Image: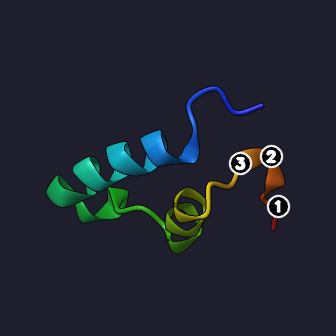
Amino acid sequence: GDMVGAEAVLATMERLGAEEARFAPSATLQRLAKNGGRFIDVLPG
């Protein structure tokens, strides 16, 4: 299962993305964090 959660990952990626655009969070990560989703629920591909 998720140990950290999408919200925590999103916060880190937003912080990193503010300094380096290549680290900006993806739309999938933003949606996952907004909806309280879990990484295990994301279909690969």
Looking at the picture, how far across and down is residue 8, in whole percent? 44, 40
The tag earlier along the polypeptide, 3 or 1, is 3
Looking at the picture, how far across and down is residue 26, in whole percent? 49, 67
Identify the mark at residue 44; answer none if there is no mark: 1
Pick out the residue farthest to the bottom: 27
Q: In which quarter of the image is the N terminus?
A: top right
Structural crowding at the residue carrying mark 1, measured as other residues with C-alpha within 10 Å and reported as few (<14), some (14–19) or many (≥20): few
In which quarter of the view is residue 17 placed? bottom left
Q: Is residue 29 left or right of residue 3?
A: left
Q: Which of the pair 28/23 is nearer the observer?
A: 28
Q: Which residue is painted at 43% across and 51% down in the image?
A: 10
In which quarter of the view is residue 19 placed? bottom left
Query: Taking 9 as reference, is 27 above or below it?
Result: below
Identify the mark at residue 38; answer none if there is no mark: 3
Q: Which residue is painted at 54% across and 57% down in the image?
A: 33
Residue marked by disc 2:
40
Q: In this view, does 38 lie to the left or right of 25?
A: right
> In terms of secondary structure, where does tag 3 sit?
loop
Q: Which amino acid does label 1 sit on?
A: Pro
Q: What residue type is labelled 2?
A: Ile
